[in-house]
Amino acid sequence: MECAYAPFNWTQLEKTDTAVDIGSASYADGYDVVMGKYIAEQLGLELVVKPIAWEGLEPAVNNGEIDAIIAGMTATPERRENVDFTDPYYESKMVVIVRKDSDLTNITSIQDLSGRKVQGQLNTLYDTVIDQIEGVDHVTPLATYPLMVVALQSGEVDALTAELPVAAGVVASNPDLTYVEFAEGSGFEADTSVSIAVKKGNTALLDAIQSALASVSEEDRQQWMIDATSRQPAQE
């Protein structure tokens, strides 16, 4: 995982009950870490978290550097060509983050962002869906949300695309920001479910992880996200 995509995963300096040591006096925590620990426990394994940049995750699982990607990743058709995915372990919705003093706080459709500078995360669907906005000023994507938040706060961009848990976490630690939800038919057309990926053809591991996932109730999945959002560190 990236260890930089709160509340799914992040890096912190404090050792806590939910965090996993990733070396260099740092720890990984977040929804993905909790889910990973649960799966490892069900399989009688120990969870080892390796921080890897987003674009390096698929190569890492295919060259054997890691066994699975648990990183808030959506199983797009393009990614399915390179790795195998479990069923979704969390489903969300797509929103936009804006400055609280912006005139965009009350928009009701993504088309209200026409002519505005909108930014998404590099190599994700949160970047590609921006082109669903007619006449949008599609700003060059950045690698992480902390960098994107700085761009929004400084006025370089007008809005950021994000899934709801990420947006809620960003807003919680940045009171000058807010997020906008859209009614069905007025928002982005995109799959915002996230799944776990393994090396293509690794059926044994895929089936084992899928079996462990099947034992997690929907109530627990939602509560783990609420808990992760509430304890994530402020994004700087």
Image: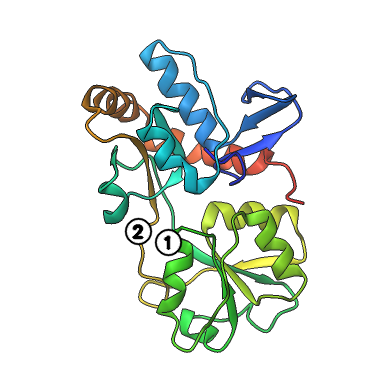
Q: Which numbered disc covers residue 70?
A: none
Q: Position of residue 174 (x, y in %)?
A: 75, 58
Nearest to the observer: residue 183 or residue 92: 92
Nearest to the observer: residue 174 or residue 84: 84
Q: Which residue is mark 2?
A: 191
Q: Position of residue 88 (x, y in %)?
A: 33, 43
Q: Where 23 sits versus 152, above or below?
A: above
Residue lying at 71% horizontally and 68% vertically, measured from the top left = 151
Using a 10 Å C-alpha cutoff, classify the residue at mark 1 as few (fewer than 14 neighbours), some (14 to 19) or many (20 or more). Answer: some
Q: Position of residue 191 (x, y in %)?
A: 35, 58
Location of residue 171 (image quadrant): bottom right
- Is label 1 in a helix, a strand or a loop? helix
Q: What amino acid does circle 2 point to?
A: Asp
Q: Work out which residue is located at the far front of the displayed protein and give it.
A: 63
Instruction: State whether residue 109 appears in this view.
Output: no
Q: Work out which residue is located at the far top of the displayed protein and give it.
A: 44
* Tag 2 near tag 1, CB within 8 Å: yes
- Is 153 positioned to the left or the right of 18 in the image? right
Q: Which residue is mark 1?
A: 125
**What is the C-alpha distance between the residues marked 2 and 1?**
9 Å
Residue lying at 60% horizontally and 61% vertically, measured from the top left = 142
Q: Position of residue 157 (x, y in %)?
A: 66, 75
Location of residue 64 (image quadrant): top left
